[in-house]
Image (cartoon, grey):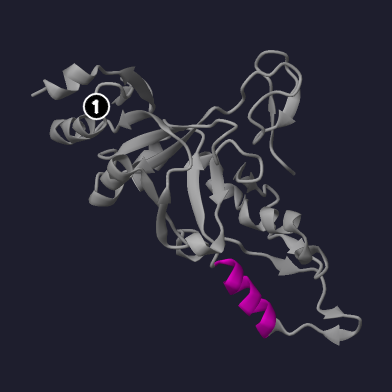
């Protein structure tokens, strides 16, 4: 089922990937995040305003784009299982860029930001960019019945089924609150222009001062900067705004 959200203003329910409440216009999910390690590739995102667009098969979940059929034959003719597996492999050639709607998850900082030594990029969703467009970017559906998606051969012919395949995952990954930008096949495994503007950089709580300075020099004083900090009495992170000059002059 397509994930929904309750409007914080008028309490109307609407689809989570819709940018605004249809009743009052209140913006729903306005930001998406990308956790990255400090590396030449991640710095190139900031410098060149481009991002890597990997194929689904290269992601870290072996069940990516996984599905099965509800029947073994069509009109009494057995379905060729080899052809089916080839079709599954072909689907995994599709490019997908992953984001999250949260910026303070301890596990994601650990897994994708090299033990909190990297940073998190905040992107702004708007109606005129790919992260805000209905047909481009969608939240992942976590199948809490823990069952692989199944379709009839006829259902596989419509785009709605493909969207479900591309955005369905095991509930084990639910903490990531992931969103996916599904790109056209010709953009697989290449650098593509950023799908939305960068609105903030969040420094990991273990990130070095010199690496913070390097990022600040790239993006300048007009960017918003925040640093993650361990809470004293909770297994949680707080987010503290930090001024450009304080970053540059730190030692």
Relative height, residue 165 to residue 221 (above, below): below
Farthest residue toward the right?
75
Nearest to the observer: residue 174 or residue 25: 25
Quarter occupied by residue 28: top right
Query: In percent of the image, x 65 and y 75: which residue is there?
Result: 87
Q: Quadrant location of the C terminus?
A: top left
Relative height, residue 8 to residue 166 (above, below): above
Is residue 243 left or right of 103 when viewed as pictured?
Answer: left
Counting from the top left corner in percent of width and height, residue 134 is at 66, 40
Is residue 173 left or right of 19 when viewed as pictured?
Answer: left
Query: In percent of the image, x 17 and y 30: which residue is there?
Result: 213
Counting from the top left corner in percent of width and height, residue 3 is at 69, 38
84 in the magenta segment: yes
Q: Secondary structure at mark 1?
A: loop
Residue at mark 1: 220
Farthest residue toward the left?
251
Counting from the top left corner in percent of width and height, residue 43 is at 26, 44
- The boundaries of the magenta stretch are 82-92
Is residue 85 left or right of 103 when viewed as pictured?
Answer: right
Counting from the top left corner in percent of width and height, residue 191 is at 39, 55
Relative height, residue 79 to residue 176 (above, below): below
Q: Quadrant location of the N terminus?
A: top right
Can residue 112 be seen here?
yes
Quarter occupied by residue 234: top left
**Other residues around mark 1 within 10 Å, as few (<14) / some (14–19) / many (≥20):** few
Query: In percent of the image, x 54 and y 43: which residue is there?
Result: 178
């Amino acid at each position: 089922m397509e994930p929904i959200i309750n409007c914080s203003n008028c309490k109307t329910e609407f689809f989570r990937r819709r940018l605004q409440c249809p009743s009052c216009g209140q913006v729903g999910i306005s930001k998406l995040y990308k956790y990255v390690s400090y590396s030449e590739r991640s710095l190139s995102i900031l410098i060149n305003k481009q991002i890597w667009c990997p194929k689904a098969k290269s992601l870290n979940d072996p069940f990516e784009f996984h599905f099965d059929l509800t029947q073994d034959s069509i009109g009494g003719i057995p379905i060729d299982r080899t052809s089916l597996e080839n079709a599954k492999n072909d689907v995994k050639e599709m490019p997908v860029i992953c984001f999250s709607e949260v910026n303070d998850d301890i596990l994601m900082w650990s897994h994708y930001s090299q033990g909190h030594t990297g940073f998190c990029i905040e992107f702004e969703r708007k109606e005129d960019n790919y992260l805000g467009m209905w047909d481009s970017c969608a939240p992942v559906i976590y199948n809490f019945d823990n069952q692989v998606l199944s379709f009839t051969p006829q259902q596989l012919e419509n785009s709605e089924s493909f969207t479900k395949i591309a955005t369905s995952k095991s509930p084990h990954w639910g903490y990531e609150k992931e969103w996916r930008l599904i790109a056209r096949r010709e953009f697989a495994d290449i650098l593509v222009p950023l799908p939305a503007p960068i609105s903030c950089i969040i420094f990991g709580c273990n990130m070095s001062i010199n690496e913070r300075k390097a990022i600040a020099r790239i993006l300048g004083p007009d960017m918003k900067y925040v640093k993650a900090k361990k809470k004293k009495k909770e297994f949680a992170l707080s987010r503290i705004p930090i001024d450009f000059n304080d970053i540059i002059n730190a030692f």
